[in-house]
Amino acid sequence: MTAVTPTPRVAIFASFSGQGGVEHMLGNLARGMLAAGVRVDLVLARAEGEHLGSIPEHVNVVRLNVRHTWQALPGLIRYLRAARPDALLAAKERAIRIAILARWLSGVRVRLAGRLGTTVSAALAGKSRLRRAAWFAGMRLFHPRLDAIVAVSEGVRDDIVAITGLPASRVTVIDNPVITPELAVRAAEPAAHPWLTDASVPVIMGMGRLTRQKGFPDLIRAFARLRAERPCRLILIGEGGDRARLEALAATLGVGTEVDLVGFRHNPYALLSRASLFVLSSLWEGSPNALTEALALGIPSVATDCPSGPRQILADGRFGPLVAVGDVAGLAVAMARTLANPLPPEALRAAVAEYTCERSARRYLASLGVAV
């Protein structure tokens, strides 16, 4: 009798606490792993936010019911001893450290990979020297204990290597699982916004949490410069603590009636697919999913040359202008030029053709040592 090979089981350890790109990408990754024939446990330290509703149906969600990732250690130890998955992927730095401790304390020999989705040195640039030193020291202590380290872009890999001193060969770059089979379907759904019915006035869009990282004040200032030269409108998709400040800035600049902060949307692609131009104005990133999604939908795009990801995605500016972070005037000029001379949609889609859910999931499984 031929022995039946059991279906591999992969655990993803993370915290869902809001509207972030990490939650969105992990849902896509789990979907891709399921499609590859792997059982997936999504082990959540914290289980909150809009993205919970988009977790694929056959993913086994394990809620540890704690408020902070650090408090998840006992629950993750219990999970490892009971479930004994074939591999464990920890997403974000805190989850990586807890996963390493849980593996050690549980005594379960599970292959462990850590995923970093942001350029850490840029994210900590405004913090105190003591906090940066402590965080970097933690990375140097914990990261060598991982079986695999995954970076979402070349810039993130270079940052990890610079901080930890590990050889570059220890860090694998895997593109985010951005493009799903459902993306085009969702993009084709109706978009209930009056500005999108008037083709004579171009609509510019930005997308992301309304936080300092996304650089939306610079985008609004650049839009105000562009609006002084030609009719146009700006839609920002996302929610966050900077809403009131951004609305006040638009009003102060005299463009309050031409800027609409539409909040979080369960299907932002119905809006995004109808944009005349997408602008990424971030101060730092890891690999900006919104930019990748815009290109996948054939939308002309402009991005800040922030660390990290836009330069890699736009191929050094071949598929859209790169503007220095904080250069409001340069951003306005790039927006005007791209509106006047957009690249063909098929060229933009080709630029991100490898950012598929299927390809990314298979590369993650390879890094986890899971054969499919």
Image: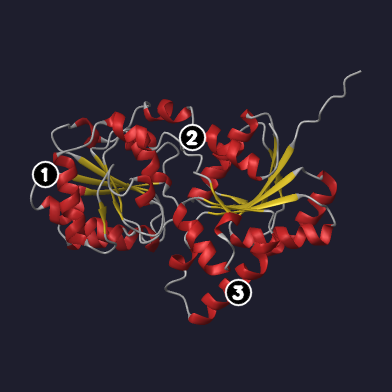
Camera-near label (1 vs 3) is 3
The kind of residue tagged 2 is Thr
Of residues 134 and 19, the one nearer the viewer is: 134
Indicate the colouring scheme.
Answer: secondary structure
Residue 242 x, y percent position in the rendering: 36, 61
Q: Residue at the bottom extreme?
A: 130
Whole-percent x, y for residue 74 in the image: 78, 60
Which residue is located at x 20 percent, y 59 percent?
221
Q: Marks 2 and 3: CB-CB under 8 Å?
A: no
Tag 2 secondary structure: loop
In this figure, which residue is indicated by the disc labeled 2? 356
Callout 3: few (<14), some (14-19), or many (20+) C-alpha neighbours within 10 Å? few
Question: Which residue position holds label 3?
Answer: 137
Snapshot quadrant of residue 114: bottom right
Determine the image quadrant of residue 77. Answer: bottom right
* Residue, far right: 1
| Residue 255 appearing in the image | no
What secondary structure is found at the residue carrying circle 1? loop
The amino acid type, in three-letter code, at marker 3 is Ala
Q: Which mark is residue 173?
A: none
Point out the tag, 2 or 3, that comes first from the N-terminus: 3
Q: Quadrant location of residue 165?
A: bottom right
Q: CA distance from mark 2 to mark 3?
A: 34 Å
Marks 1/3: CA distance?
A: 51 Å
Kindly state the secondary structure of the residue where label 3 is placed.
helix
Name which of mark 1 and mark 3 comes first in the sequence.
3
Residue at label 1?
Answer: 231
Q: Quarter of the image containing the N terminus?
A: top right
Q: Nearer the viewer, residue 194 or 85?
A: 85
